[in-house]
Image: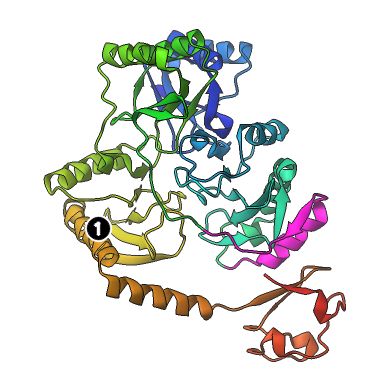
Amino acid sequence: MEHLIKINLPGGFISAGDLYEILLIAESAGATDIRFGNRQQLYFTVKADRLEDMELDMLKSEINFEIDEDVYPNIMSSYVADTIFNHQDGWLREGVYKDIFDRFDHQPTLKVNLVDNYQTFVPFFSGNINFIASNINNYWFTYIRFPKTDKLCCFPSLVYSEDIPALAKVAEEIILQKKDLFYNQADIDEELFYKTLVKKLAVAIRPVTEPLKLPDFYLPYYEGFNKYSNKYWLGIYRRNELFKLDFLKDVCLLCLKTRIGQIYTSPWKSIIIKGIEQADRNQWGLILSKYHLNVRHAANELNWQIEDMCKEGLDLKQQLVRQFEEADARTYQLSFAIKTQPKTGLQGSIILRKDTQGLYDILHTRDFNLNSKDEVIYARRIKPHALSKKLIALCNEFYDQQSDPILSSTIALAEEDRSQQETAIYQCNCCFTRYDKQYGDPENDVEKGIDFESLDDYACPVCDAPKSEFMLI
């Protein structure tokens, strides 16, 4: 019997020395391979008769770990993308990330994400509590994806960097203490959740003055040697998700020898080493040669999200990649997610969702952006052997849409018309009560459908604040 060991790497990075220590413990326990998860965590397996010795070694080294459990999801971040995949000069840098991680005094039981708003390498909304950098220095959007639902709620206020750990802790406490309201519920009162949170939390907030603008999705090629500034970074992906323990030990030792402090993990189950000097590049090439590692896989193999430790999903991915290659199919700007379990939180431009009969529904986001939550169904109940044909047809539709200016402009106009039909919501600056014309305001005898701008002498039904104290959100 084997046991699965999970170690969280908060933020998706670890010092070379700390990783080397973990590798020695895993090796002593009989492990030969390491895996990385889609939340940037680390896995390995040990046999039952080696488990007790491994636990003692972990405790001596003060390493937090879980055995056959995932009670504490890793805190996920886009720190891995910093300096190499950011295409604009924002304010979010290494020091800000580390300051936030250092302030976490609890292990979250809900999924927490910290993401730069300029990159698209790390998914925006795959957590339950998602912090996304705004354009205002050191302030973040907060999006809650309530557990076991697809309900996504954006707070009307921005939170300061230093207050992120406290907000995450209180938000989690509220959700878990009031499961009948906020956990696995079809209807969730977002306003009640926000008011409850604000009452329990004394932090620096400021109103959202402009909405988050999602960047167009682009998955950078995250393998091989790549130059940035006057240095190189190296990305390594493994087709079977397995990294040989001896290889990773050599990586750690070379990092220590060449004064590279950290190793990064990605949501695509790969690793990245930054800061390689030109003079040291040959040594890294020798390690790749020693272990016969290919670092130039086809792009259509790198853009998949599958569940951790899921052989069924991995086998299906490999089957579909082979069929894509045989058909010479283009998948640039697209990503795929395979969900064999319900409500896994995986994101993709195109989603394969398994049903209870072993068949798959094919969905895609309306704009084919991995970070969009607006999904539409393309095909239902497809047998696994017939998936590739449907997927290739969907990919072709995506490129036809891009290349046809008339179709693209029609879609753009439809999207613009749809956005104009969205309801304008106003919020009281004093008590955060909202006015939504879809519901009106029965307390003030305002019927449904009345625009806020047309109301005269309006006052907040909760705190009597005047209309001037309401802000469009």
Is 133 on the left or on the right of 226, as rendered? Answer: right
x then y, percent, for residue 357: 28, 56
Residue 192, quarter of the rendered image: bottom right
**In the image, what residue occupies the spot 56% across and 25% down?**
65
Regarding residue 359, the answer to whether it shows in the image is: yes
x then y, percent, for residue 116: 56, 45
Residue 470, quarter of the rendered image: bottom right
Above or below, 82 against 386 in this view is above
Q: Is residue 416 magenta?
A: no
Tell me the colour scheme of the image: rainbow
**In the image, what residue occupies the spot 31% across and 17% down?**
288
Name the kind of residue labelled 1 in the image: Cys
x then y, percent, for residue 464: 87, 79
Is 393 on the left or on the right of 268, as rendered? Answer: left
**In the image, what residue occupies the spot 52% across and 46% down?**
88
Q: Quick one: 30 or 241, which is closer to the camera?
A: 241
Regarding residue 30, the answer to whether it shows in the image is: no
Above or below, 291 against 391 in this view is above
Q: Is residue 193 magenta?
A: yes
Above or below, 338 against 268 in this view is below
**In the image, farthest residue toward the left:** 326
Give the position of the C terminus as an image quadrant: bottom right
Label 1: how many residues lie within 10 Å, few (<14), some (14-19) or many (20+)? some
Give the position of the N terminus as an image quadrant: top left
Is 211 on the left or on the right of 290, as rendered? Answer: right
x then y, percent, for residue 155: 67, 60
- How many circles with numbers are drawn on the protein? 1
Q: Quick one: 327 or 285, which is closer to the camera?
A: 285
Query: Would you name the residue on which mark 1 appears?
Result: 395
Above or below, 269 against 347 in this view is above
Give, as a single range, the part of the protein colored magenta: 187-213
